[in-house]
Amino acid sequence: MASKVNLSEKFALFSEQWSPKIVARFNNNEIRLCKLEGEDHWHHHSGTDELFLVVEGVF
């Protein structure tokens, strides 16, 4: 059985901007958290599906 990940607790563990942290793995997938500030230069990773969930602010 998978364990739950508390996003607030995980975000509190780091302060670096633009430095994704892996907080969980499942079925060969990774869940990463990242703090962002300023402009993002959009890009993509071929062969990879990505989901962006905004917890606070605007992306």
Image: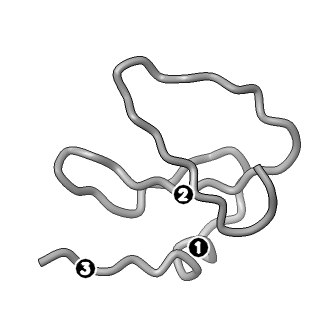
Separation (CA) of disc 1 from disc 3: 18 Å
Q: Quadrant of the N terminus?
A: bottom left
- Please state which of the two labelled residues, at mark 1 or mark 2, is closer to the viewer: 2
Question: What numbered label is drawn on residue 40?
Answer: none
Q: Is residue 8 above or below residue 19?
A: below
Q: Quadrant of residue 4?
A: bottom left
Circle 1 residues within 10 Å: few <14, some 14–19, many ≥20: few
Q: Is residue 44 above or below residue 40?
A: above
Between 48 and 9, the one nearer to me in the picture: 48
What residue do we see at 46% from left, 39% from top?
50
**Kind of residue at disc 3:** Ser
Q: Circle 3 is placed at which residue position?
A: 3
Q: Is residue 5 left or right of residue 28?
A: right
Residue 17 position, x and y percent, is 73, 51
Residue 52 position, x and y percent, is 57, 49
Q: How many marks?
A: 3
**Does label 2 or label 3 sit earlier along the sequence?**
3
Question: What numbered label is drawn on residue 13?
Answer: 1
- Disc 1 secondary structure class: loop
Residue 11 position, x and y percent, is 60, 71
Separation (CA) of disc 1 from disc 2: 11 Å
What residue do we see at 76% from left, 26% from top?
41
Q: Is residue 5 left or right of residue 19?
A: left
**Does label 1 or label 2 sit earlier along the sequence?**
1
**Kind of residue at disc 1:** Leu
- Disc 3 secondary structure class: loop
Q: Circle 2 is placed at which residue position?
A: 33
- Disc 2 secondary structure class: strand
**Does label 1 or label 3 sit earlier along the sequence?**
3
